[in-house]
Amino acid sequence: MTRAAPATRSSAYGALVLTAALWGSSAVTARGLLDTMSPVALTALRWIVVLAALAPFVWRERAAIAHALASDTRTLAVFALVGFAPQTLLVYVALEGTTAINLALFNSAIPVLIVAIAALLHHRRPRALELAGLALSLAGVVAIVARGRWSTLASLSVNPHDLLVLVGMGVWAYYTVRLADRAPALSFPAFMFAAGTLGLAMIAPLAAWEALTSGIGLPSASALAGVAYLALLPTLVAMLLFAHGIARVGPVQAGLFTHLVPVFGAVLATLLLGERLQPFHAVGFALVAGGAALGCLRPEPALAGANLAVAASGAPALERNRRR
């Protein structure tokens, strides 16, 4: 097993920080859009824009994409289900009935679930530093979402939408771990196009039913701008950056950076909504940053050798890895 070079790890950590910043803006934007359109419509429009944006860049791989869709449909369908349009729709349905605090708390479970799933699928034992970093950053998330008052947590209630959030976080954690095993017959953009196409096809019957029963309303210009933002930055760019990070530091360490999402959410609220930073923000920021740094002190051995790095870079590999 080879380890990623320090410069490579630094680029991966930078990509993961930027990913968290983009995701921090996603929930706020989606909540606003769900006031004007349904979860099904928002999900469908978001992924249509993603695929349209990807199409020119993967055109030269169209034969490989068609071959993968025909010969590896099952694997692509699993990825489509847990990481693309169906997972997006699940989270959007949950967003309609959950609170911001509950959403942030359940989102913070992703790194924990990644550790558990990696242990189940790969028999990977978490390291002491990773567990310590995970606990420290989780404490930081709790400090932020509870706003420094433990009574906030004591008064929380859970409803069916919260359970949908937890399911959505669980399938995303599974996607994160499985992505490290992906055999790179396609570059990641081409893989994203193939799985994204299948994911969109999976929700197409729901979109058609909604159009037939409720009609089709034309979104406003501001809503379309919001959809374009969600598609191009928190989806397309963030998923490319996230894949880059996973390829170089592994899913467990990449998952730690998910705890930065509420941190950036608070920063954006300060910059865009005029909210004031409070002492609990500073405590939470310090704990999350310290936890991420602690968990990443010991580099992760490369999980899939050179082919995974090639896949993240966007260059198509010549042959598939054999499942170990």
Image (tube, rainbow, N blue to C red):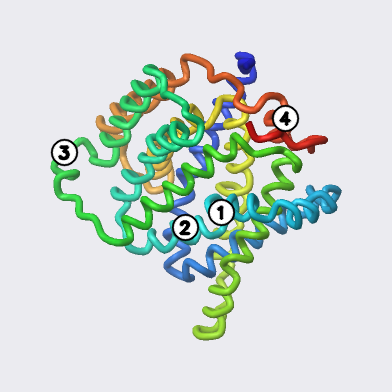
**What whole-number distance in Å separates the C-alpha atoms at marks 1 and 3?**
33 Å
Choose top left, top right, bottom left or bottom right for residue 178: top right
148 vs 198: above or below: above
Dot 4 alpha-carbon crowd within 10 angstroms: few under 14, some 14 to 19, many 20 or more:
many
Query: What residue does disc 2 label?
Result: 30
Secondary structure under tag 2 reads helix
Question: Residue shown at 44%/35% (left/top)?
Answer: 120
Query: What residue does disc 1 label?
Result: 230
Labels 2 & 4 near each other (Cβ < 8 A)? no
Secondary structure under tag 1 reads helix
Task: Point out residue 105 in the picture as x, y percentages from the top left corner.
Answer: 31, 43
Q: Amino acid at mark 4?
A: Asn
Answer with left or right where residue 184 lies relative to residue 251. right
Query: What residue does disc 4 label?
Result: 307
Quadrant of image for the C terminus:
top right
Q: Amino acid at mark 2?
A: Ala
170 vs 201: above or below: above
